[in-house]
Image (cartoon, helix red, strand yellow):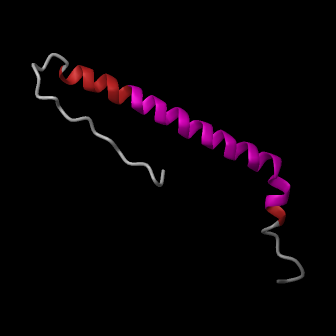
Amino acid sequence: MAGQEQVRPRGRGGDGDEGPEGDAGQVSARKESIDADVDSVLDEIDGVLESNAEEFVRSFVQKGGQ
């Protein structure tokens, strides 16, 4: 989406206990969160189009040979 930046976690340079598995868990959780947000926006768009479908189609129908 516009206005959102991708944030990548940086290593702390510590003892390395967390490893790639910890990063993969964070990435997976963030991906699931973003997927849920996108799904909710798409559901909202679908709802608007369903309720205004007839009006939406009429706006594109040419009238009187225009």
Say above or below: 47 vs 20.
Answer: below
Say above or below: 39 vs 28.
Answer: below
Q: Residue at x 41, y 32 (%)?
A: 31
Characterize the magenta stretch by its predominant secondary structure.
helix
Q: Please identify the quarter of the rendering in which residue 17 is found.
A: top left
Describe residue 14's horizontal placement relative to residue 48 as left or right.
left
Q: Which residues are magenta?
A: 29-56
Q: Please identify the quarter of the rendering in which residue 42 is found.
A: top right
Describe residue 50's horizontal placement relative to residue 15 as left or right.
right
Q: Please identify the quarter of the rendering in which residue 12 is found.
A: top left
**Quarter occupied by the C terminus:** bottom right
Q: Residue at x 9, y 19 (%)?
A: 15
Image location of residue 21, percent across then percent down = 24, 20
Q: Residue at x 68, y 47 (%)?
A: 45
Q: Nearer the viewer, residue 65 or 20?
A: 20
Residue 46: within the magenta? yes
Say above or below: 40 vs 49.
Answer: above
Residue 5: within the magenta? no
Image location of residue 26, percent across then percent down = 33, 26
Q: Nearer the viewer, residue 51 or 18?
A: 18
Describe residue 37's horizontal placement relative to residue 3 as left or right.
right
Q: Nearer the viewer, residue 16 or 46?
A: 16
Q: Residue furthest right?
A: 64
